[in-house]
Amino acid sequence: MTHSTTGASGPQRMSDAEGMMWRLEKDPFLSSTFSNISILDKPLDFPRFVRRIQRASIVFPRLRQRVQPAPANLGAPFWQVDPNFDINNHVRHIALPQPGTMRQLCDLATLFTADPFDRARSPWQFLVIDGLEGGRGAFISKIHHTITDGEGGVLLSMQFLDLERDAPEPPPLPEPDFSDTHPDDEAADVLRAALNDALRIPLSFVKQIRDTLSEPTQLPAATAENAANIRSLLKQLGDTDPARSPLWTERSLRRHLETLRAPYGRLRDASKELGGTLNAAFVTAAADAAGEYHRRLGAPVESLRTSMAVSTRTNDEETNAFTLVRLLVPTGEMPIEERFAAINELAKSVKSGSDGASLQTIAGIGAAVPTSVLTRLARAQSQTVDFATSNVRGAGIPLFVAGSRLVGNYPVGPLAGVAFNLTLLSHDGNMDMGLHIDAAAISQPGLLKECMEESFENLMRHAPTPTPSSVPEPMPMPPPEAVAVTSASGSATRPRWWRRRASRSTTT
């Protein structure tokens, strides 16, 4: 899961998409930080957890790297080794005040997620939390999207997850040696790569983009490929069709978080019965709830636009492999099975790639646009979207962290200018969801959660009634030996300790 141009211990250039996400941080409304609330059956063993995260920071070199802007902002920023790396700056331990409710934990998570990273350090943190009611514990993981995406975060978590409560710790790894790294050499490498970035986009193409953005009707003469890319950029970023909600018109930096849970098996069976996919059911429930929310507040709306994250991952070494697509989903009053059929057809068109340019294509062209222009375009584009959805595949078996069992996993997706983000993470037979809300846009978050719960229940009524003799089928999970991680040297390895424990767990 590394992206490197000069080696694991030297400077590593961000991809165009990562560079774009980092540049967009100039506008706090466009932050791409995401987090996850993990609920535990008891407080975890904190020293043991710190040792595991310390080990993970050796396996994944990016966790020990900070962001360095390219000289004169020529091209994407770089990752460089943080000479002052200290695990205590990234893993912290607190306790909730009594009574330690889930509401208190969610409020803490919104504040923690919104707090900007210290740019002098690598942009990730873990907050371990004791004092949750019922004798439980929790931790919140917070990662900037430039480090990895949701699926990459699941792979990274394998470095501190166990398949048994009292599993032996993996063997320690030697600390990386950067003694042969010289600042002057690194600076030269960064400057050389930055100049290569600048030469990668011809000045004539930069002028074409500038002229097109100033006068879109006059597409300048260009090669067929460049002209197509510029048209895609205009289609994706230049669309000014406003968001459809008559209620969700305000935007702010005030956040509210709700959590939901639905059984994986029932929703999967309902999706099959209705002739579609689980992801279509997820988006259908979100659209159905959004429409019902508007009807109950006396402002019915026939359609809303959602932004959906679609994975493009082809191997486990990719740090960020996704694209964003926009769908105009039906939200008027109709039977939920009709809504499902319509959204399932929309999802098929997305899968076929009919929505236009990928995130990488847009980011590559966006690299030629000044940051001030890029943030303005991105803010305008976010105003065309009502809500966002994302579906991340997790583990279908019991998991443990430093002696505690993981009993809930609620993701907190970035808002980036929309009214709410509903992100799903499958876990141990359940679909755990974080409903991240802009509190200025949605005045009654409790009502929206209630509508969501009702919509999922209405969908699951279409699942066939199980027979008494039927045995619940476990949620599928990639076999551990199919998952590759990255060693400190940057090469793909498969940890034997994980495979041994995975085999032992699945045969008991």
Image (tube, grey):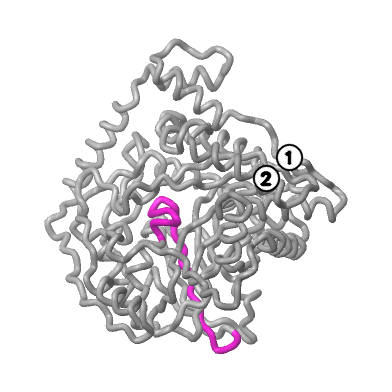
Q: Residue at x 70, y 60 (%)?
A: 452
Q: Is residue 140 magenta?
A: yes
Identity of the residue furthest to the left in this view: 180
Contact (Cβ within 8 Å) of mark 2 with mark 1 = yes
Screen quadrant of the C terminus: bottom left
Residue extent of the magenta highlight: 133-153
Residue 386 bears which disc, if any? 2
Q: Is residue 489 above or below residue 373?
A: below
Residue in the foreground of this view, choosing between 413 and 286 = 286
Identity of the residue furthest to the top in this view: 221
Please tell me which of labels 2 and 1 falls first in the chain. 1
- Residue 150, given in percent of the width and then of the height, sits at 45, 56
- Residue 111 visible in the shown view: no
Residue 244 bears which disc, if any? 1
- Residue 105, given in percent of the width and then of the height, sits at 59, 74
Secondary structure found at label 2: loop
